[in-house]
Image (tube, rainbow, N blue to C red):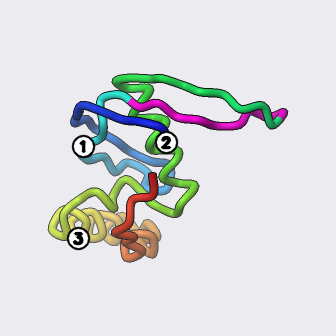
Amino acid sequence: MIDEGGEQEGEEGCLSFPGIYAQVKRPQWVKIEAQDETGAVKVYEVKDFMARAFLHEMDHLTGKLFIDYLSNIKRNAIKKKMQKHNLPDNKVNNKNKKRHV
């Protein structure tokens, strides 16, 4: 991550938690340096939904999930919902408080 700014709040979900969605705050825009499939360095400046998507996927690279941004109360409510529907909830207990940027 090169730079970020602003703030947006929007609904996020993840294939790791089917049918689970929550409001998550993230930067409004980001500037990111990354490598493409050939190893060439690219710089991306994205905003709004695309910034949210980039950050969500970058979080996966460091083991962070969107539920890590939620309060304990909301996370516990998600855990109960997952148990009710017999979904694996082992990821809910894997809270990583560090945000790597």
In the image, residue 19 sits, relative to residue 91, either above or below, namely: above
Q: Residues within 10 Å of mark 3 (few under 14, many from 20)?
A: some
Looking at the picture, does residue 13 appear above or below residue 6? below
Between 78 and 28, the one nearer to me in the picture: 28
Question: Is label 1 or label 3 in front?
Answer: 1
Residue toward you, 8 or 75: 8
**In front: label 2 or label 3:** 2
The residue identified by callout 2 is: 1
The disc labelled 3 sits on which kind of residue?
Asn
Distance between the Cα atoms at labels 1 and 2?
A: 17 Å
Task: Please give the name of the residue rendered at 37% of the width and 53% of the height, measured from the top-left corner.
Answer: 66
At horizontal 45% and vertical 51% (from top left) the residue drawn is 101
Mark with earlier residue (1, 3): 1
Residue at left 44%, top 26%?
A: 50
Q: Which residue is mark 3?
A: 76
The residue wearing badge 1 is: 25
Which x, y percent locates residue 11?
Answer: 28, 38
The type of residue carrying mark 1 is Lys
Q: Residue at x 41, y 31 (%)?
A: 30
In the image, the segment drawn in magenta is 30-38
Q: Residue furthest left?
A: 73
Q: In terms of secondary structure, where does tag 3 sit? A: helix
Nearer the camera: disc 1 or disc 2: 2
Give the mark nearer the N terminus: 1 vs 2.
2
Q: In the image, residue 26 lies at what x, y percent?
A: 29, 41
Local crowd at mark 2 within 10 Å, few (<14), some, or many (≥20)? some
Q: Which of the pair 88/65 is nearer the observer?
A: 65
Give the SS element for disc 2: loop
